[in-house]
Image (cartoon, grey):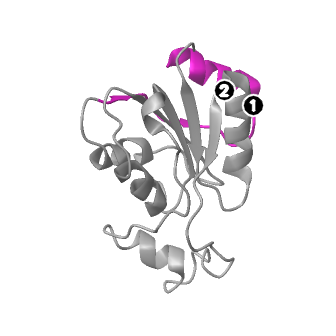
């Protein structure tokens, strides 16, 4: 990949962050961690509690958790790899916040996810609604650990 690449990830356990850092290393891309304005506690992430913050957010399609940081120069990137854990079969709402915060026109977006029990499912295509303009979407890939062969395959196919 000779184009300028950004690897942007949201991670609460560190798994997605670790994979994203490895993708950035292998690709030579820049790494950006999507940080929530309000950090998620273990109680917030308790998916068995219908009143936990993550459960409430995921049950509200309009929820858009605030992001504490911003990509300094999104316009300079040609390709954006977006990483996220699977929550309730899709990307966490903060990924929608991220996608709605920038103009991705003319860019390629490559989603990747991590999950303890689910595959990519519809998580990658469900994100298309959050981006307008002329965007090239690559098929999402599940990468649960920093597997260099799988990462290189994803990058080569983009």
Question: Label 2 belongs to which residue?
Answer: 151
In front: 138, or 122?
A: 138
- For this view, does 110 lie left or right of residue 83? left
Q: Where is residue 86? Give x, y as percent.
A: 54, 55
Query: Is residue 18 located in the magenta-colored stretch of the structure?
Result: no
Q: Residue 28 lies in what quarter of the image?
A: top right
Residue shown at 49%/19% (left/top)? 158
Camera-nearest residue between 117 and 141: 141
Picture residue at 75% right of the left edge, 25% below the top? 148
Question: In the rendered image, which quarter contains the N terminus?
Answer: top right
Q: Answer with left or right where residue 46 lies relative to residue 101.
A: right
Q: Which residue lies furthest to the bottom in this view?
A: 51
**Which residue sits at x=57%, y=54%?**
34
Circle 2 sits in a helix, a strand or a loop, which is it? helix
* Label 1 crowd bin: few (<14), some (14–19), many (20+), radius 10 Å: few
Residue 48: image location, x then y, percent: 58, 79
Q: Is residue 110 above or below residue 60?
A: above
Report the residue that reaches farthest toward the left: 133
Residue 134: image tag: none
Residue 149, placed above or below residue 97 = above
Q: Residue at x 31, y 49 (%)?
A: 130
What distance separates the C-alpha of mark 1 from that of mark 2? 6 Å
Labels 1 & 2 near each other (Cβ < 8 A) = yes
Counting from the top left corner in percent of width and height, residue 2 is at 56, 13
Relative depth, front residue between 17 and 6:
6
Indicate the secondary structure of the residue bearing disc 1: loop
State which region is magenta.
135-158
Give the residue at mark 1. Answer: 147
Where is residue 26 drawn, in percent x and y? 72, 24
Q: In this view, does 87 lie to the left or right of 131?
A: right
């Amino acid at each position: 990949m000779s184009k300028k690449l950004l690897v942007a990830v949201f991670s609460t356990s560190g798994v997605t962050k670790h994979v994203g850092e490895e993708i950035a290393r292998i690709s030579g891309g820049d790494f950006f961690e999507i940080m929530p304005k309000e950090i998620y506690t273990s109680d917030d992430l308790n998916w068995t509690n219908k009143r936990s913050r993550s459960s409430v957010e995921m049950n509200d399609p309009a929820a858009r958790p605030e992001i504490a940081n911003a990509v300094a120069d999104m316009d300079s990137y040609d390709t954006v790899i977006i990483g996220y854990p699977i929550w309730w079969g899709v990307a966490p709402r903060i990924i929608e916040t991220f996608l709605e915060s920038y103009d991705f026109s003319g860019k390629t977006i490559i989603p990747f996810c991590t999950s303890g029990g689910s595959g990519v499912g519809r998580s990658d295509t469900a994100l298309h609604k959050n981006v307008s303009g002329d965007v090239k979407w690559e098929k999402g890939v599940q990468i649960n650990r920093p597997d260099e062969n799988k990462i290189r395959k994803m990058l080569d196919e983009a």
